[in-house]
Structures are given as C-alpha cells and as structure tokens.
Image (cartoon, rainbow, N blue to C red):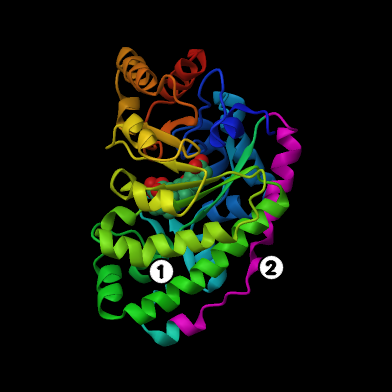
Amino acid sequence: MNNSLFIKSAFSEQTERPPVWMMRQAGRFMPQYWEIKNKYSFLEMCKTPEIAADVTMLPVDLLGIDAAILFCDILVTGEAMGGDLSFTQGIGPKFANPIRNAQDIDNLRVDVMGELQYVADAIKVIQQRLNGSIPLIGFAGAPFTVMSYLIEGGSSKDFKLTKLFIHNHPDLAHKLLSKIAAVTADYLNLQIAAGVNAVQLFDSWALALCWDDYKEFSHNYNAEIISKLNRKDVPVISFCKGSSVFAPLMAEAKPDVISIDWNADLKDIKQRFSSNLAVQGNLDPHILYAEKHVIKDRIHRLFERMRGENGFIFNLGHGIMPDIPFDNVKYAIDVVKEFRY
Ligand code: CP3
C-alpha cells in the first residue's frame, strides 16, 4: 500500500498525478446505492459487514477512485456511548435522548469498543474484497461535531443549543468532549488494528465556531486524538468545514493531511505550512452539477494551481450531494486521472 498514489501523496511524496476520491462517494447519487438502500435501513447497512462492504465497493467498481472509504457514519460513536440513534429518510440523523445536563453526560459509556466490533468486522471483509488494489480509509467524527448532534438531537442550522451549552456550561462541555475524544481515539485505533490504511477525522460543523471556541472546544480534542493514534504507515487526515480559516490550528494538531473546504486558494494553504503537510480538496461540489466543459475547466484550474506541489489529494470541499448526476461524478474522476504533473 505504501506505493499507492494515495498513501504517497498523503505522506507528501512525489507522484505522477494526484490521487482522487470523493467524500460521500458511496451514497445516494448512485442508482446502485438505492438498490441496496431500498432493502435495508441505513444503520442495518452500516452494521452488517457484508452489506457495508458491498456499498464500500460500489465507487471502487463503478467510478475507479484511488481510495475506498469505509461505509459507516460518524454518529456511531455517539450511539455506542448510549445515544438512541435513528436515521429517517428526508430528516436525517436523530438522537431521541439528547444531552441536557450533568447526569446525561455521566450516563454516557466510554468502554464501548465491543459495541463497535461490527466496524472492525466490516473492515476485514472490505480488505479481502479490495485485495491490495487501493487503500481503505477509515474515519470518525470529531468530538465537537459529534457533541453537536448529541446536544441538538439531530442536524441543526445554527447550533444554538450546542453553543449555549459550551458558553453557559463550559465545564460540562469539556467533560462531554473528553469522553467523546477518549472513545474516538480508541475507535480509530480499533479501525487501524482491523486494517484501514488511512484515517480521516470529520469535524464537519467546526465552521459554526469563532476562533477562541474552535481552539478550546474542538482543536484541543482533535489534537489529543491525533496524538494517541497508532499511526505508523497510516496517514491521518483532518477535515473540517471552516478549514480555510482554521488551517493554522489544524496544522498544529499534526495530521499528515488537512482537507480544505472550497473557500480557500489551495495553493496558498499548501504553501503556508511545512512541506510535509499534504492538502486534500477542494473543488466546490456544486461544480459537479454544471456542464461537463465547466467541470473540466474548474478541475484544470485547480491542477494548474497545484502543479509542482507534492502532497495533493484531489477531493471535493465537502461531500457529493445526493442529486448530483452520476455521470458528472464519473466524468470528473476521469478528468483527474488523465492529468500528469
Ligand atoms: O463518504 C462516504 O461515502 C462514506 C460514508 C459516510 C457516510 N456518512 C454515509 C452516510 C461518511 C464518511 C459519513 C460521515 C458523516 N455523517 C458526516 C461527516 C461528513 C460530512 O458530510 O460532513 C456527517 C456530518 C454525518 C452525519 C449524517 N449522516 C447526516 C447529517 C446524514 C443525513 C444527511 C443527508 O444528507 O440526509 C447522515 C446519513 C448518511 N451518512 C447517509 C450516508 C450514505 C445517507 C443515508 C441514507 O441513505 O438515507
């Protein structure tokens, strides 16, 4: 695996072209995903290793991406700790027992790797199917983002309850974040032990925070998790929305790669930090709705920016939306694969 385009780029080694994968590459934009989704609930898909492997392999077989990502969800850590999690079509994730007070936090369990064993099992099945062809990325939600779901009880537009909680009850928030961080580090190490070749920490909603709050309630915990990972030969990718702003702190947490949203000039970010810090990103996913000549032009613009830089993994600034045409996604991947530095 150390010779794959993806792992070499993640460790900032020279490659002939950037590797490509896309966040949410195994999802609803694929007709084949629906054939499986119509038979099972989302959590059943995550928790049945053979099905999780089938879904993980869809973009490998149909899109020809350079890295696979485990099919699961960031909220399974919250569920294992005691959150009553469900996913409803059109509504999204829901925790029926949101965190409201100190007692709720005390009730959360941290010794939960047994409950997440299905993820290790899925990783083993997926690695058999991949058979050394491309690397497998594991992932977890970052503590702040997972905490926001546990407090809001689901998705939120403004994170009002979460922010009120960290501002009025910082001690409780730290207690909760510490528990989630401990589970998250164990969980990523469980995935590494089971055989993933890289891990990505998703702090999707960090962009809701101001600088001081990001530092205190997100960055510190992400840095703690990254420092605890058994990461020999396993690159660590740090992702958040808001990364154009928070990149200096993300770099301080010492991942191998920072994944950048679409607001920033990727070359500018790349050049601001050590040459050993790779970047991932950062096409606006909305470009994939556009006509093919626009898709090609925007991908080429990104390449021209990144020409001559080692340590560039092509991705979107955030996940593929469910109604993006499959053909456009496939086309974008083909355009990336034709490029040479
Ligand atoms: O990227 C991949 O292909 C791997 C699988 C993956 C999923 N979720 C599958 C999924 C990954 C890496 C995630 C991470 C995830 N989950 C994040 C971080 C990434 C991001 O997008 O910022 C977040 C915030 C979640 C929480 C989550 N899970 C939400 C908000 C939703 C509903 C979203 C929506 O658009 O309805 C989910 C459900 C989910 N996770 C689906 C998939 C394929 C859709 C489930 C369905 O089929 O209904």
Residue 91: mark:
none
**Does residue 333 appear to the left or right of 245 in the view shown?**
right
Q: Nearer the viewer, residue 19 or 93?
A: 19
Give the residue at x 51% y 28%. 20
Residue 97 locus on image (x, y percent): 42, 75
Give the residue at x 55% y 59%. 227
Give the residue at x 26% y 69%. 163
The N terminus is located in which quarter? top right
**Does residue 247 appear to the left or right of 335 in the view shown?**
left
Quarter holding residue 6: top right
Residue 152 part of the magenta segment: no
The span shown in magenta is 105-133
Q: Which residue is mark 2?
A: 114
Q: Is residue 315 above or below residue 215?
A: above
Q: Is residue 309 above or below residue 232?
A: above
Q: Which residue is mark 1?
A: 150
